[in-house]
Amino acid sequence: MTQEETPAGQALLNIRARIDAIDDQILVLLRERLACAQEIGQLKNQERRAKWDPLRERQIFERLKIANRGEFPEQPLISIFREIITTCRLSQKTAEVAYLGPEATFSHLAAVKYFGHSAQFRPLATIEDIFHDVEHGRIRYGIVPVENSIEGSVTSALDCFIKYRVKICGEVNLAIKHNLVNYSGNIDDIRQVVSHSQPLAQCREWLRQNLPGIPTQAVFSTGTAAQMAHQDHSLAAVASDLAIKTYDLQVVARGIEDYRGNTTRFLLIGDRSPGRSGRDKTSLLLSLVDRPGALYHILDIMAAGGVNLTKIESRPVKGEAGKYMFFIDIEGHIEEQLIEQTCAQLRQTCASFQWLGSYPLMAEEETP
């Protein structure tokens, strides 16, 4: 008697047949959903409406979580439907997304996390290149790192918001896991460690204890470092999981970051911000009038209006000693009356005022 002829074997075959039938049904429904999305795209084109409706997407996720009743693991459920929704939306018009390259950087991973695998991803050499190409319409979106939970702000990105006219369209938080990789997988072959300056800083103590006397070198990105390690077998790179497969490298050590809970916040930039989702954030860039209590005054405006300030950070104005720009994040959307009125007051009070964008808050299930 073969395994298939036993009662257990026959039961297994029956279950597999049911799975095949379910997969066929899922495929039919996915194709039907895609067709519906394309019809919606045509209707939106007729009315010149935006393709992306954050409020509608948030309502879909909330409805699915309620209907699921916790039976299917919630995080994978949201990830699956985000991929489906993004694929259907991009069928109306494929998004081109620039990221800090080359391939397999953490910026690349953040872009895939935000858009799924259906977008067209384009690596660029520097963060400023991303801002430049978005501002000039050469690329539809760019994704840039702005803040790390361990090392703080990515100042080059903040400076670009001062220099270029783009709008923030969204945000994504990415849990950062650093790996030490090289061609052989042997730690004794390492003569130098290369990576972006932030990962090197985030792994400083581990490198000091485990590779004493081995020099480090900062390069443009973790992807560049992985490329270098592939070409020069005396080098090791601090890089992502994706870089291991992309550049045919071996793992020397995993998880070498000095602190757990290492997270980087990325912002999606484009030419316009989306409409209200119901849970939004607004980012502002402003400078103050040169007088005592100027900063206190703008904070008082927000406090008096009941606006929740979630972040404030200053950056020096290039070439103007003693002058600073302030980056501010507040809860709410510019289309809300309270936020609109507060911004109008700030515009009248500040020496300069720029609305950087309003966009959906990172959903709780996405935050590492």
Image (tube, grey):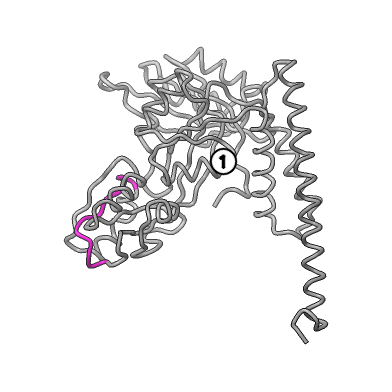
Specify few, some or many for label 1: CA neighbours under 10 Å numbering under 14, 14-19, or 20 or more: many
Secondary structure of the residue carrying numbered label 1: helix
Q: Residue at x 54, y 41 (%)?
A: 172
In percent of width and height, residue 249 lies at 36, 58
Q: Is residue 363 above or below residue 314?
A: below
Region rendered in magenta: 187-198
Residue 12 or residue 317, whichever sits in front: 12
Q: Residue at x 74, y 82 (%)?
A: 3
Which residue is the extreme one toward the left?
A: 213
In percent of width and height, residue 72 lies at 74, 59
Q: Is residue 10 left or right of residue 239?
A: right
Residue 125 appears in which quarter of the rendering? top left
The amino acid on which the numbered mark 1 sits, given as a three-letter code, is Tyr
Q: Is residue 246 magenta?
A: no
In percent of width and height, residue 128 lies at 36, 28
Point out the image quarter for the N terminus. Answer: bottom right
Residue 257 or residue 41, whichever sits in front: 41
Which residue is the extreme one toward the top?
A: 348
Q: Which residue is mark 1?
A: 114
Residue 154 appears in which quarter of the rendering? top left
Residue 16 or residue 301, whichever sits in front: 16
Q: Is residue 252 above or below residue 242?
A: below
Q: Is residue 190 magenta?
A: yes
Which residue is the extreme one toward the front?
A: 1
Q: Is residue 279 left or right of residue 191?
A: right
Which residue is the extreme one toward the bottom?
A: 1
Q: Is residue 76 above or below residue 114?
A: below
Residue 41 or residue 23, whichever sits in front: 23
Q: Residue at x 39, y 63 (%)?
A: 254
Q: Is residue 123 left or right of residue 322?
A: right
In percent of width and height, residue 157 lies at 39, 32
